[in-house]
Image (cartoon, grey):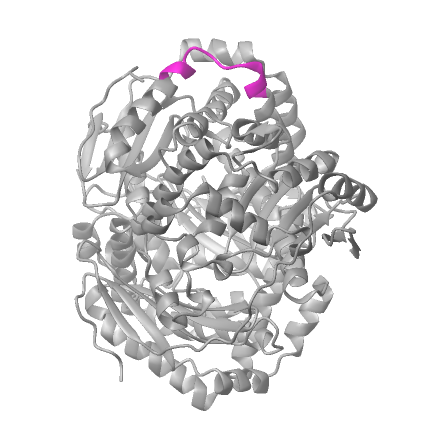
């Protein structure tokens, strides 16, 4: 049922990876360039987002208005994203419009105008985004959890900080673009209705002439405090708990994934059952897996009223410590059913597949087909996951809370 | 894609869009029950009841319900609005039968007292979630100010007071007044086995007792107000603005959707170029919503507090200018491309079609294929847009701002 994955590495280092889905009318792309927050100079927090914002204000033959108008007229649904290690541009459209959509974004990554006369407008946009986070405590606590959990610069927030945004001029932006928007390390994932030889030719024409260049490496710093409270007069106390796990490319990844799934994905997961269903302590509670290239974390979140926050954190920590004692067969069966249906439903979405194959290539240097994932998941057993949990039980937590009062960290108390 | 339908003797209607190329099925029970059916005393009961459906039935505990959905690998949830409560699941075709049975079962919940009390805490937490999150309840405040005593002015979530005071018995009474099979549509999309769907529905829902569940659709008498809510701890100022728009039964609603794109889409619209692109607002959008007998245009804006007054003036000027000068052919054609593309892309997934097909049937007892939807969009003219602008002036609105400002001057 799965079509063969195609890939090609151009001489400049750009990798094109594609998955034909001939049963769809759409095609989607995800273009990842190796420009991330980790590449920002220490005093330039937010530079990557600022650069991305500027790159979208006109490129190649289009000024910023033409850029938006052309994408609208083509019916391209697009978005951009900035993360720790990458800047991503993605879009979906009816298949016939894909080459033009790619042409527009090929200009963005190679020939943006970075117009100085729009620098102040872009700066205001950056400020707005930074301030919006201040009004979103649930988002803020997760941003802070990443910052505390990962050693700097790996937990940097894409929004940056006020002082840096205030000071950034056009030169640092041009420099950042010049150094990090490069084909070596860039990945273009395309999925949907496509013709592989034609697509390869199109990409060769659009991105084949993009010059590769060397970029400086990243030096690891230190992680933040293990326990942190951010005082803010909110209705709820927002709780984030993070702990170590294996990265996506690790042979143990699927074992770790299984353990996180039992912990916090779905409404029959342990966190949802214990914190919300049995005790009614909160509305939102979950756990999610987050991976960088060579390190990863599990991030749990719950939001609850201040007077019940201590109990919520206690229950969360008790559930985590229980997880170290193992999972049950029925829990794994449910997870397998979820991943199986998820894999099949991915075949109905060119957007989901284009982002998945680009991400796979980034982490693995290849793409796992849906069949391969399916086989690996079939091979998981409660014993294999429990053996993993015995080696790497949840522990050594990073705990960030945001709310009117700090909480006590009572490990293992229910 | 083929459309088929069937009505059970109990009055439950089953509608389906069959797509043999799909890899999954999406199923949804659309119950005509929402905040507009509530009274002050039971404000929030529709939404609370939606939560209670997942807390167990005579044959299932709450844990059983979640466990069984997860055993099927279902993507499932529920939502409550002013007019409809939707319970849905997307599953693989082989789980169609089991998913229908489970969804049908939770539509006859036990409403047990102890579950009710536990879930009440969850609802109260959900209310707090929205109090901590923009626009900090300004949307519900604006709706209440705009609609006044009209049922559409009610809060979907209810308030901490109304939820605290609500009894399980009052919820049971509400259930017995709204959840008649004649008031429910079962919609299905994707690779559906329709004969099996009818048989399963008959078996699981056939015994549901039928009764009258009327809804009063009196016309709204919208207000024009300008309110400022002071919230010193907020960083940005948030604005919600409502004005009259074409209702769900008016043909002009299509033109209204395109107009909202032209003036206030997230990108490429007049509000975008005037406020978002230059960084004067974080966000400034216009949306159109439709209900039975009423329609709404809603403007949402967030910005730095000190820019609020100027920005509100810009919004008003944009609306006035559109009312007098109309929109251009180019703008309309750009909006059509966006809307058409959205229709095509979302139609690739059964889950994407479910709300189109279900809501179309619930609201208008009509089926519209993807082709018809695209044709309708293509047929809208600049004149159609103009007649919406004339008939529904955006400049006559109710506005609520919330944030650090104690006072915001009203634009002139």
Q: Residue at x 39, y 33 (%)?
A: A280
Q: Is residue A172 magenta?
A: no
Which sits in the foreground, B2 or A118? B2
Taking the view exactly as shown, the residue that stands out farthest to the bottom is B324
**Whether residue B235 can be seen here:** yes
| The C terminus of chain B: image quadrant | bottom left
Q: Percent x, y for residue A240?
A: 31, 32
| The N terminus of chain B: image quadrant | bottom right
Vertical side of B349 occupied by A380: above or below: above
Q: Is residue A330 magenta?
A: yes
Vertical side of A279 occupied by B307: above or below: below
| Image-quadrant location for residue B182 | bottom right
Vertical side of B107 occupied by A201: above or below: below
| Image-quadrant location for residue B90 | top right
Q: Would residue A72 be found to the left or right of residue A307 on screen?
A: right
**Whether residue A219 can be seen here:** no
| Image-quadrant location for residue B345 | bottom right
Q: Would residue B101 be found to the left or right of residue B215 on screen?
A: right
Q: Percent x, y for residue A195?
A: 70, 49
Q: How many marks?
A: 0
Q: Would residue B298 be found to the left or right of residue A378 on screen?
A: left
Q: Percent x, y for residue B376?
A: 67, 73
Vertical side of B409 occupied by B321: above or below: below
Q: Which residues are magenta?
A: A321-332
Q: Residue at x 39, y 85 (%)?
A: B320
Which sits in the foreground, A336 or A291? A336
Q: Percent x, y for residue A102?
A: 55, 56
């Amino acid at each position: 049922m799965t079509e063969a994955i195609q890939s090609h590495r151009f001489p400049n280092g750009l990798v094109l990876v594609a998955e034909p889905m001939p049963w769809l009318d759409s095609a989607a792309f995800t273009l990842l360039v190796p420009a991330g927050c980790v590449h920002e100079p220490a005093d330039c927090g937010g530079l990557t987002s600022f650069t991305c914002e500027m790159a979208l204000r006109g490129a190649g033959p289009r000024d910023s208005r033409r850029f938006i108008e052309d994408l609208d007229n083509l019916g391209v649904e697009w978005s951009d994203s900035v993360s720790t290690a990458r800047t991503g541009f993605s879009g979906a459209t009816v298949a016939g419009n894909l080459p033009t959509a790619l042409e527009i974004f090929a200009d963005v990554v190679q020939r943006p105008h970075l117009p100085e006369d729009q620098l102040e407008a872009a700066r205001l946009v950056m400020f707005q985004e930074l301030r919006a986070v201040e009004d979103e405590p649930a988002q803020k606590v997760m941003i802070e959890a990443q910052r505390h959990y990962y050693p700097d610069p790996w937990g940097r927030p894409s929004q940056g900080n006020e002082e840096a945004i205030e000071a950034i001029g056009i030169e640092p932006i041009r420099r950042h673009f010049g150094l990090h928007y490069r084909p070596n390390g860039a990945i273009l994932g395309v999925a949907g209705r496509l013709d592989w030889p034609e697509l390869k030719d199109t990409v060769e024409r659009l991105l084949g002439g993009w010059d590769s260049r060397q970029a400086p490496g990243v030096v690891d710093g230190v992680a933040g405090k293990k326990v942190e409270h951010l005082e803010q007069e909110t209705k709820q106390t927002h709780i984030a708990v993070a702990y170590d796990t294996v990265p996506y490319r690790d042979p143990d990844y699927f074992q770790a994934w299984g353990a996180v799934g039992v912990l916090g994905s779905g409404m029959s997961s342990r966190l949802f059952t214990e914190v919300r269903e049995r005790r009614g302590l909160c509305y939102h509670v979950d756990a999610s897996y987050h991976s960088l290239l060579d390190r990863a974390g599990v991030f749990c979140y719950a939001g609850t009223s201040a007077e019940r926050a201590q109990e919520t954190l206690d229950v969360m920590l008790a559930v985590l410590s229980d997880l170290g004692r193992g999972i049950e067969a029925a829990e794994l069966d449910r997870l397998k059913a979820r991943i199986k249906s998820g894999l099949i439903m991915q075949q109905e979405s060119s957007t989901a597949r284009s982002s998945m194959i680009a991400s796979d290539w980034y982490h693995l240097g290849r793409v796992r087909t849906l069949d391969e994932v399916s086989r690996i998941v079939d091979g998981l057993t409660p014993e294999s996951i429990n053996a993993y949990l015995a080696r790497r039980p949840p522990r050594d937590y990073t705990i960030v809370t945001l709310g009117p009062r700090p909480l006590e960290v009572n490990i293992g108390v229910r | 894609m083929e459309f088929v339908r069937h009505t059970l003797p109990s009055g439950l209607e089953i509608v389906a869009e069959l797509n043999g190329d799909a890899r999954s099925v999406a199923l949804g029970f659309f119950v005509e029950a929402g905040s507009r059916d509530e009274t002050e005393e039971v404000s929030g009961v529709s939404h609370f009841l939606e939560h209670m459906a997942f807390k167990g039935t005579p044959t299932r505990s709450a844990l059983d319900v979640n466990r069984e959905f997860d055993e099927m690998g279902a993507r499932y949830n529920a939502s409550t609005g002013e007019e409809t409560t939707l319970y849905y699941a997307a599953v693989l075709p082989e789980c169609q039968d089991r998913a229908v049975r489970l969804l049908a079962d939770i539509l006859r919940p036990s409403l047990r007292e102890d579950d009710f009390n536990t879930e009440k805490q969850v609802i109260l937490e959900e209310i707090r979630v929205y109090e901590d999150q923009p626009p900090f309840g300004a949307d519900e405040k604006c709706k209440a100010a705009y609609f006044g005593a009209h049922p559409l002015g009610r809060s979907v979530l209810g308030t901490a007071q109304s939820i605290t005071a609500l009894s399980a018995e009052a919820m049971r009474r509400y259930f017995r007044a709204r959840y008649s099979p004649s008031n429910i549509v079962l919609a299905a999309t994707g690779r559906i086995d329709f004969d099996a769907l009818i048989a399963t529905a008959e078996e699981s829902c056939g015994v549901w007792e039928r009764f009258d569940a009327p809804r009063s659709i009196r016309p709204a008498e919208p207000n024009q107000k300008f309110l400022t809510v002071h919230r010193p701890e907020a960083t940005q100022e948030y604005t919600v603005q409502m004005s009259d728009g074409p209702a769900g039964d008016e043909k002009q609603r299509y033109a209204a959707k395109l107009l909202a794109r032209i003036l206030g889409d997230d990108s490429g619209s007049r509000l975008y170029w005037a406020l978002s692109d230059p960084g004067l607002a974080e966000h400034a959008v216009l949306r159109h919503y439709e209900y039975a007998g009423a329609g709404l245009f809603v403007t949402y804006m967030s910005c730095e507090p000190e820019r609020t007054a100027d920005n509100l003036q810009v919004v008003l000027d944009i609306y006035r200018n559109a009312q007098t000068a109309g929109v251009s052919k180019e703008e309309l054609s750009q909006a059509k491309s966006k809307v058409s593309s959205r229709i095509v892309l979302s139609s690739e997934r059964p889950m994407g079609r479910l709300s189109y097909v279900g809501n179309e049937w619930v609201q208008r007892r009509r089926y519209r294929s993807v082709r018809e939807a695209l044709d309708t969009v293509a047929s809208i003219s600049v004149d159609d847009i103009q007649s919406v602008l004339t008939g529904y002036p955006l400049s006559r609105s109710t506005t609520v701002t919330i944030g650090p400002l104690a006072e915001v001057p009203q634009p002139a």
